[in-house]
Amino acid sequence: MLRASLSLSLLIAGVLCASCSDAADDIDQFSDCIDICGRYQECFDEDYDTDTCSDRCEDMEHRNGATDVDRCENCLDDRSCVSSVFECGSECVDIVP
């Protein structure tokens, strides 16, 4: 009886941990999209529609996985606006114009 209760508890804990991991990944991906689109607005076009950009970015993540979005966001980290144009164009081309 004790062994069955312990097994059930471990099973439930495992399911909950998997759900937490998925939620954390979704939050990270959402945050990456907001960062990328906000960076484009900040550097190139103050009237840029970041909501539409974020939606396109999130759709791309669901179709292609987070690899492209992660690559773009990681490239933009710690770069100036000018540097990001020359260094990150190919990584970010499908997300921002």
Image (tube, helix red, strand yellow):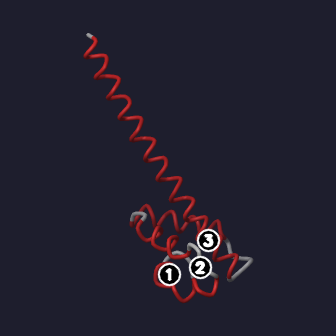
Residue with the mark numbered 3? 37
Q: Callout 2: few (<14), some (14-19), or many (20+) C-alpha neighbours within 10 Å?
A: few
- Quadrant placement of the N terminus: top left
Q: Nearer the viewer, residue 2 or 89?
A: 2
Q: Earlier in the sequence, mark 2 or mark 1?
A: 2
Q: CA distance from mark 1 to mark 3?
A: 12 Å
**36 left or right, relative to 74:** right
**Front of the two marks 2 and 3:** 2
Measured from the top left, where is residue 53 in percent x and y?
59, 70
Residue with the mark numbered 1? 93
- Which mark, by number, is residue 79? 2
Q: Callout 3: few (<14), some (14-19), or many (20+) C-alpha neighbours within 10 Å?
A: many
Measured from the top left, where is residue 21 in percent x and y?
43, 46
Residue at 64% across / 65% down in the picture?
A: 51
Which secondary structure lies at badge 1? loop
Q: Nearer the viewer, residue 94 or 77?
A: 77
**Front of the two marks 2 and 1:** 2
Q: Contact, CB < 8 Å: mark 1 with mark 3?
A: no
